[in-house]
Amino acid sequence: MSKRVLLIASTTGYQARVFAEAARRMGLELVLATDRCHVLEDPWGDDAVPLRFEEPAPGVAALSARGPFGGIVAVGDRPACVAGHAAASLGLRFSSPAAVEATNNKFLARERFRAAGMPVPSFRLARRGTADETRYPCVLKPLGLSGSRGVIRADNPAEFVTAFDRITKLVQDPQVLVEDFIPGREYALEGLVTEGRLQTLALFDKPDPLNGPFFEETIYTTPSREPEAVERSIREMTQRALSALGLTYGPVHAEMRVNDEGVWMLEVAGRPIGGLCSRVLRFDPDASLEEVLLLHSLGEDLSSVKLAPGAHGVMMIPIPGAGVYTGVDGLEQARRVPGVEDVMITAKEGQMMLPLPDGASYLGFIFARGETTGRVEAALQESHKCLGFHLLRALPVVR
C-alpha cells in the first residue's frame, strides 16, 4: 500500500503544518492540495496541488498524476467536501460527497435528523419579514459557517431583524436557518468513523454557559465529568446522526446539547476539531491526533487507541472587542500557571481582530493538563486572567 497521503486544507489553516510534521515523524509522504491560484507555479514552495474549493472538479482530475495515494485527510468544512469528491474519484476511503455536503448545510442536516426520528427543534428557512411569525427565543444561523460564526439568539421580533441583517451582511446569502433555542449544557465529541461505526476519541465538556446572544466557545475539557449514562446517550445519538447523514469513513467533530428531554445534535462535521485545538489530545503511548488520523486514512486498525491518562483542556482565547492587535502583557506569567502546558498567541501584530459572531479566529490558545478536569479548567481560567491584550480601536472611514 502506498505511504503517500493526500491532505486537502485551506492555505490559511494552522493544521496543514501540523499534519506535515506528523507525516515526517511517521515516515509518510504528504501531498498537499489547497485553495490557491493555479496560474502561479508553487508560490509557497510546498509543491501543493492547486484547487478551487468552490469548483473542485478540474483540480480533482489533476490529482491522479500525483498518486497513487494510500489515504486522504481533510481539514476544514469546505476541504472535507472536496475530499469527498477526490476520494470518490481516486478510490480512497472517505465518506461520500453527498454525505459530507450534508454536514456543511445546517438546514439539510436538520432535515436528515428529523427524517431519522432524532430530536430536533422547530426549524425553517427564514425571511426578514417573518419576525412576527417566529416563536421566541430562537436562534438564527447561516447555513454553511462553523465555529458559532454568525449564530445569534433573538428574544423578540426587533432582535430577529437585527440578527437577520447582521448574518446576511456577513455571508451575503438571503437564506438563514431559524430554530427554537435549545436550553441545556453543550458538549463536543471527537471521533473516527469506520464503515459507518463511531469510535469516540474524546468527549469534551464546555463548562461556560452558552445561552447567547452569541455563542463564543472558550473552554473544552476532557474527560467529561458527566455520568456514564449521559456519556452513553451522547455517543448513541452521535451514531444516529452519522447514520442519518450517511457518513461512513474519516474523522468527525460533533456538537450537541443535553437537557432533561435528552440529547439534541447541533451539528456534525466530517473533519477534525479546528484550529490548534487538536494539540489538547494525546493518545497512548505518545501520539497526536494528526498521527491517529493519518493512520486511519491508511486503513490501519485503531480500535485500541485510547486517550492518554489524566485530564486535558484547551481555551480558545476570546476577542474582547474589535480592534487592531498590537501586543499582549503577562504571557510568561500565564505560562507559569501550574498545569498550563503552553500559551500560544496566534494573532499577529497589526491584524484586525473581530469577535464572534462576525469574526472567524481567536487571539490564541491555552493548553493545560492535570489530574482532574476541574483542576485543568481552573488552570485555564487562571492563565487567561494573567493576559492583557492591546487592541487598538479602528476608526471609521469618513468619505
Image (spheres, helix red, strand yellow):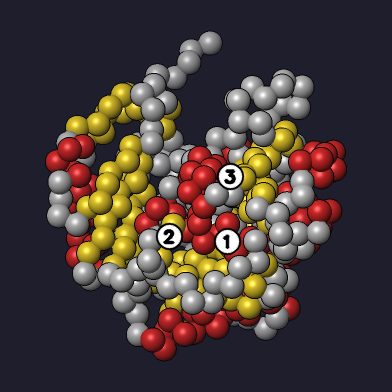
Three-letter amino acid code of the residue under disc 2: Ala
Residue at 72% x, 41% y: name it.
53
Disc 2 to disc 1, how far (Cα)?
11 Å
Mark 1, Cα crowd under 10 Å, few <14 / some 14-19 / many 20+, is: many
Q: Earlier in the sequence, mark 2 or mark 3?
A: 3
Q: Which mark is residue 287?
A: 2
- Front residue of 310/76: it is 310
Q: Disc 3 designates what residue?
A: 167
Quarter occupied by the N terminus: bottom right
Disc 3 to disc 1, how far (Cα)?
39 Å
Q: Are marks 2 and 3 in contact (CB under 8 Å)?
A: no
Q: How many marks?
A: 3
Mark 3, Cα crowd under 10 Å, few <14 / some 14-19 / many 20+, is: many
Q: Disc 1 designates what residue?
A: 295
Q: Earlier in the sequence, mark 3 or mark 1?
A: 3
Q: Earlier in the sequence, mark 2 or mark 1?
A: 2
